[in-house]
Image (cartoon, rainbow, N blue to C red):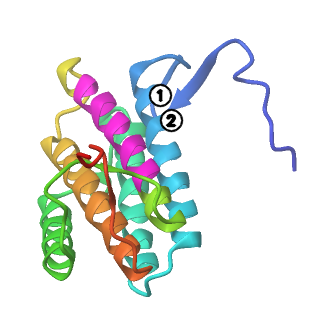
Amino acid sequence: MRLYTTKGDQGQTDLLGDRVAKDDPRIEALGSLDEATSSLGFARAVAGAERTAPLLVEVQRDLYKIMAELAFVPELRPATYVLGPDRVAWLEAETDQITSEITLPREFILPGDTVPGAALDVARTIVRRAERDVVGLTGGGHLDNPQLVRYLNRLSSLLFVLARFEDAAHGTDPLRAKAPRR
């Protein structure tokens, strides 16, 4: 089996139901989501707290569902490939639970106090880019599921608190962005 087809050598690729340029905004969003789930995989691999990895697996599966939803043209998309509000509610509940277990700083912080926390912060920034891409798809008329933007917005919050949770599990207090006054 060959892993390459050469069909993309002219700068086009397939959506499910359409052939588009590789710089199509839907492909850009899919790329950002793919990067986000890979980054979450790295964060999962280095996570120290026991509950982090299973939580990230669920998120990665949600992101794959979102990618499947975006990969179909609307008229061919199966209803089972549409992310529902229940997944947004799940993220909110998980974020609230973790937030209740840690003390969040009132100031901006500098990411990078622990490897797992830093990995989660990198993943958060990639999710934010994917969110911007999905907002662009919505504004461009390519997408009509408001749950996708909501999910990605909530996911960045979860990843922020999960990074602080990992930092706390390592006994580290986040470094404040603003230097203390002397």
Left or right side of 23 for 154: left
> Which residue does the image show at 39% across and 73% down from the upper left?
172
- Residue 134 belongs to the span the image colors magenta: yes
Q: Which residue is mark 1?
A: 27
Whether residues under marks 2 and 1 lie with C-beta atoms below 8 angstroms apart, the answer is yes
Q: Residues within 10 Å of mark 2 (few under 14, many from 20)?
A: some
How many labels sit on residues? 2
Q: Secondary structure at mark 1?
A: helix
Q: Which residue is mark 2?
A: 31
- Residue 14 belongs to the span the image colors magenta: no
Q: Residues within 10 Å of mark 1 (few under 14, many from 20)?
A: many
Q: Position of residue 154 (x, y in %)?
A: 19, 54
> Which is closer to the viewer, label 2 or label 1?
2
> Which residue does the image show at 18% across and 51% down from the upper left?
107
Q: Position of residue 114 (x, y in %)?
A: 49, 66
> Which residue does the image show at 50% across and 58% down from the upper left?
119
Up-down relation of residue 162 to residue 72 (above or below): below
Residue extending furthest front?
A: 182
